[in-house]
Structure formats: C-alpha cells, structure tokens
Image: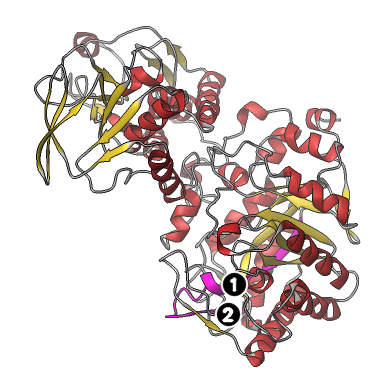
C-alpha cells in the first residue's frame, strides 16, 4: 500500500460512474486553455497538456468544453475546441488516446457559452434578451423555438462524436452563465412558452438535451452534468437554492449518471473561488446534493487539500474530488499525494491569473508553473530538469521567490548553489504579504514549497546575512545572481521623518500605525496595505496615488472587490494626485482641484523601488525579479525559472 492510499483511503479507492470504473476519486475538471487553433481543431499543445493531466494520476480527466454549433454562437473562447462537425473527431481522438495511455477515464465536455459566447460575433444568444452586467460580453438576442430545438440537436450530435472519438463518457456544462444555466435561471429566462415560466419549464431545455443524449449514446455511456447548486444572483432576481436543487433533480430524472455541482456565475456579486473564501466553504452545497440525489456528486471550488476532500467523502458530503486550478498548477498532484510527497506539490495561490488570461483572449497561464503550455518542451523542466554538463558555483543574493525559484532549478541541475538573505526568513515580499487578511496566509504555501525544493536538491540557504558590494567584488562564484527585490521608497521632502514607514514593516508589525493613516501608492501593495489596516481596525485610511484607478497590477477577479471593500469601509481614495511633500502634520499633494494637505499620524510608503545596489558591483552579474523592476509575483517566478534554465 502506498503512503497516499494509507493516509487517504477514500480518495484512492476505486469508484464507479454508471458502469465505468475509476482507479480513484480524483477528477480533473474541465478547463479552457486557448491552446487550440482558432477554427476549433485540436492542437499539439492541447494534447500535451491533457496528456500531462492524465499522467499525473487523476481517475477522471475531463476535456475543455467543446462548442457544438457551426455558427460559433456557443464559442466563448478564442482557442475553444469544436465538435460541430465529424472532421473534428480525429483530433478529439488524439486527446482520448493520450488520456487512456495513463489508465485514466476520458470525459469530453460539451459547452455552449450562451450569453457569454459568440466570441467572434457581434451578438450572443439566450432564452431572453437580458442586459449584460459585464461590459466584455455582447448583448444577447432571444432564441426562437426553432433555434432552441436546433441547439438541442447539436448537443446530441456532439455526444455522438464524443462517443465515436473513443471517450468513456460525456459531460454537459450548465454553469457560470453558460446557455443551459441561462435557461434554468429566472434572472435570464423571461420566456412564457414551454422553455420558460416556472423551474420545470426553465429546465426543459436542459432536460431535452440530457434525454436526447441518453437516447443517442445508450444506457451504458456515462453522462455527467455540471450545474449550479447556488447561483448567488439574489441581487438580479436569480434562482433560489431550492429552485436550483429542483433543476438538478430534473437532470437526474432525465438520465444523468453524475453531478458536478458548482456555485455562482460570472455575473455574481459574490466571489466564489478567491483566497478570501475559506477552503471547503462550498461543501454545504455538495452535501445538500448528496442528501437529495442518488447519483455521485463531484465538486471543485476551493478544494485544494487532500485531507479536506478525504474528510468530505467520509462525512458523506462528496463522492468525487474535482479540481481545476490546483491541477493547472501541478498536474502531478494526484501522484504526489499517492506517493506521500505532498511537500513537492506546486501549490495554487488562487491568484486567478489563469482566468484573467482567458478573458483577455490569451493562452492559459499560471503564476506558480511557467512550464504550463510547455509540457512537451524539455527545457522548461515539466518532467524535471536535466543535469548541466558543467557544474558551477552559483551565489544568489536574495531569498525571495525569484531567488528561491532560481536556486531550486539550478540545484536540480547539479550546480553548487548558495542563497543569501539579510532577513531571518525566506520569501521576501511575499512572506510579508502573507500577513494580510482574506486568505493571504496561503502565500506561504509557495514559499515553503520553493524552500523545500532548494533544500531537496542541496542548495544552501544563509539567513541574517547582509551582503556588501565589496563581498560581491571579492566573490569567486562562477555566477552571481542579484534577487534582492524592491523596497518601499518615495523621493520627496520629508520622506525621512519618523512617522513615515514602509508598507513591508506594517505587514510584519515592525511599525506602529496611528489613527490617521495615509498610504502612498497605486499598486497592489498599496491596496493590500490599506485593506490590512482596515482589517486590523482603529484606523482612518486614505489611499493616495497618481493613477486614476489603483491596482492596475491586480487581477480583475480581485480588484473590483478590493475597491468595493475600501469604499464600504470608508477608506478615502485620493486619485490623480502627486505627492509634493511630507510634513509632521500630513501629506501635501497636488490634485486637479489644487494643493491640499491630507492629515496623517502615519504615512505608509507603498511605492516600490528596485534594490539594484549590488547589480553593478562587478561584471557578469545577473539581476532578476523585482530587483529589475517591481511587478507581479508571477514575473519573479518566471524570471527564476528562465534564469535557472540558462545555467
């Protein structure tokens, strides 16, 4: 028995969906990638990505959603797979074969994106013409009965192609504002014919799709459906949880073999997958499904840890542990758990850069795994980095995430690596940020992982040791890498006054903050500082900066909520403003309305300046991370991997 089987016996027990047997209860959930060709045909990159998910040990591997119509009304992503023509079958078969090669069950998802579809059109479709909440999406036009019936048949035809491509089952997507959910929801379905009205009428479109697919594929071919257990659209007249449950019961009666239950829409005012949502928070929805259904229930959404999933299965809340983002971050997650190597799992930070990329019509990307999309390219090290032909002595100055990532790759390649930092801990700015509210303590999972990897491959880490230019000049290292990050700094008169402090010191509670606190900066660091002070309480917070909108470096799935929280808690956002001077009484600023003085007991600097003092100490010094220029943490990780690749 392997360590994971002993520790998590339910996760790693065989299971069945319909008549199909699974080797474990782990399901890789459907995720769009934009890796495919614009015409809907499967690309080599997509096949390599899906092969990696299967190789990693999941019992079920689900493809991204495939759009079912030739018009592209159901296409919501520029690189989305197509399944509306038999010509797509050979490419889809390639994914099937890649999944089956690793003893995983292959499921293909059918997806019509509805009111968030039509990516290449000037309109979208839906049951009714309901105004869009998100400006990115085009206005929908109401589908006729003939168009609805044609769409149902297109789903049925897609299931036939799925079966002919060798898949073990089919999944139908009806979540987050896609077409099936548009019909089910009272928010977007105002019809008065058989496809509207009460929940039974609104579920008719979904029911006919499931019934039609069952008739097409036969009794032994599993049908999974993804549906919302709670829409979280109360502010827009959406379904009550009882109505969502009723729709799901209708799906069960229509012939599904498994439910993948979710929460929320893209238009919901409530966040569902960000760090401030505690892990396992949504399990109460899965538990409700378990109590009311006889088919297996799967769930993703903030289910990152195996113990959480194991306990949920034991307690009867869940049957299948489904994951998207954790397995984007590390497709090998199931096997690492099985082999008792949890400390080697690349941890998802719930930063949601993956989602942000898709909404910008770009390929899927990941903060913590730059090898995403490069699974078949040996240089990127997805399967591990090969040893270098020449062993070098490498000195990395700075143990933030850029330095640690470089050190881990360099040590894995066989180099003699030393990492030095003046602090008493690793992690740099990310470690400081982990003191923030709203789940930011999860940042330390990445720091701990990188430190473990460094030590695993023999890199030496020296802490509490400042490095001078003279030491750099005298070093006999073959390669010196400066990864000293950035420091809060502002170049105005009064910046050296005693009540002016660093945002990093505020996070690490090294600086006392008075009642009236003025935070200077436009970046995510400035916003995080303001939120931290509000969370601690007892402060009147002003956020002062040049930009019209703060947080341009913050993920879109977070920034709107951060700004809302700042305003809800009466923080003052002073924008389009230049700081002229800091005085003992406050901050003198130039605004569009003229010069003003903002009173302050404490001024917190969150303008970041790169630490480049050591970068010019001698020739052939490499500089990485924020020591080049302050930016998102994903840039530091990418720098670290690329630097390590060069060594």
Task: Name the residue that disc number 1 marks.
Answer: 188
Q: Which residues are magenta?
A: 105-125
* Contact check, label 2 and label 1, Cβ < 8 Å: yes
Q: Under tag 2, what secondary structure?
A: loop
Q: In terms of depth relative to the viewer, which is nearer, 401 or 443?
A: 443
Residue that appears at 58% across and 41% down:
383
Q: Which residue corresponds to the image point at 13% horizontal and 20% vertical from the top-left?
A: 583
* Left or right, 586 with reference to 243: left
In this picture, is 20 found above or below 564?
Answer: below
Q: Quadrant of residue 24?
A: top right
Closer to the camera, 134 or 386? 134
Graded by Cα atoms within 10 Å as few (under 14), some (14 to 19) or many (20 or more), the crowding at tag 1 reads many
Disc with the residue nearer the chain's start (2 vs 1): 2
Answer left or right for 603 relative to 386: left
Task: Give 556 or 349, whichever is nearer the viewer.
Answer: 556
Kindly identify the residue that appears in the image at 39 percent across and 26 percent down: 533
Residue at screen point 82% across, 59% down: 258
Residue beneath disc 2: 128
Q: Quadrant of residue 152?
A: bottom right
Q: Is residue 393 visible?
A: no
Count of numbered circles in the view: 2
Residue 230: percent from left, percent from top: 68, 55
């Amino acid at each position: 028995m392997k360590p994971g089987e002993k520790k998590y016996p339910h996760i790693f027990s065989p299971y069945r969906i319909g008549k199909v047997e699974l080797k474990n209860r782990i399901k890789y959930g459907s995720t769009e990638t934009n890796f495919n060709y614009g015409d809907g045909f499967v690309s080599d990159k997509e096949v390599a990505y899906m092969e990696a998910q299967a190789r990693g040990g999941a019992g079920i591997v689900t493809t991204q959603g495939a759009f079912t119509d030739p018009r592209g009304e159901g296409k919501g992503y520029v690189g989305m797979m197509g399944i509306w023509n038999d010509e797509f079958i050979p490419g889809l078969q390639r994914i099937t074969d890649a999944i089956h090669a690793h003893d995983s069950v292959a499921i293909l998802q059918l997806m019509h994106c509805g009111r968030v579809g039509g990516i290449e059109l000037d309109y979208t479709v839906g049951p009714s013409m309901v105004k869009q909440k998100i400006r990115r999406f085009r206005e929908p036009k109401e589908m006729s009965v003939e168009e609805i019936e044609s769409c149902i048949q297109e789903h049925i035809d897609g299931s036939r192609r799925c079966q002919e491509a060798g898949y073990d089952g089919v999944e139908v997507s009806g979540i987050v504002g896609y077409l099936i959910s548009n019909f089910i929801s009272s928010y977007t379905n105002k019809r008065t014919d058989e496809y509207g009205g009460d929940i039974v009428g609104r579920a008719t479109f979904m029911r006919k799709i499931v019934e039609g697919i069952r008739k097409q594929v036969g009794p032994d071919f599993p049908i999974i459906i993804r549906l919302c257990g709670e829409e979280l659209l109360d502010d827009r007249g959406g379904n009550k949880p009882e109505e969502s449950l009723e729709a799901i019961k209708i799906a069960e009666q229509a012939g599904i073999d498994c439910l993948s239950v979710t929460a929320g829409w893209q238009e919901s005012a409530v966040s569902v997958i960000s760090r401030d949502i505690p892990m396992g928070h949504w399990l109460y929805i899965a538990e409700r499904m378990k109590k009311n259904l006889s088919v297996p229930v799967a769930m993703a959404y903030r289910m990152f840890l195996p113990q959480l999933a194991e306990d949920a299965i034991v307690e009867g809340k869940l049957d299948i542990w489904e994951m998207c983002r954790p397995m984007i971050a590390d497709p090998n997650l199931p096997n690492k758990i099985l082999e008792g190597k949890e400390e080697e799992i690349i941890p998802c930070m719930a930063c949601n850069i993956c989602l942000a990329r898709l909404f910008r019509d770009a390929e899927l990307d990941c903060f913590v795994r730059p090898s995403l999309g490069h699974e078949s390219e040996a240089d990127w090290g997805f399967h591990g980095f090969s040893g270098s032909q020449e062993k070098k002595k490498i000195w990395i100055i700075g143990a933030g995430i850029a330095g640690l990532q470089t050190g881990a790759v360099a040590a894995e390649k066989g180099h003699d690596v030393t990492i030095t930092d003046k602090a008493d801990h690793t992690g740099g700015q990310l470690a400081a940020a982990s003191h923030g509210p709203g789940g930011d303590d999860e940042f330390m999972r990445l720091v701990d992982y990188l430190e473990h990897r460094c030590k695993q491959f023999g890199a030496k880490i020296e802490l509490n040791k400042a490095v001078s230019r003279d030491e750099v000049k005298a070093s006999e290292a073959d390669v010196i890498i400066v990864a000293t990050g950035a420091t809060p700094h502002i170049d105005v008169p009064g910046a050296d006054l005693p009540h002016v402090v660093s945002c990093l010191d505020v996070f690490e509670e090294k600086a006392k903050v008075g009642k009236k606190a003025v935070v200077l900066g436009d970046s995510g660091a400035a916003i995080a500082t303001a939120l931290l002070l509000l969370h601690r309480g007892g402060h009147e917070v002003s956020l002062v900066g040049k930009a019209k909108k703060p947080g341009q470096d913050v993920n879109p799935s977070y920034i709107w909520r951060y700004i809302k929280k700042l305003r809800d808690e009466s923080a003052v956002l002073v924008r389009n403003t230049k700081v002229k001077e800091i005085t003992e009484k406050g901050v003198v600023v130039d605004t569009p309305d003229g010069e003003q003085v903002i009173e302050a007991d404490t001024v917190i600097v969150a303008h970041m300046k790169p630490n480049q003092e050591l970068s010019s100490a001698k020739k052939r010094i490499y500089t990485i991370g924020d020591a080049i220029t302050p930016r998102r943490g994903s840039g530091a990780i990418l720098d670290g991997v690329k630097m390590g690749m060069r060594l």
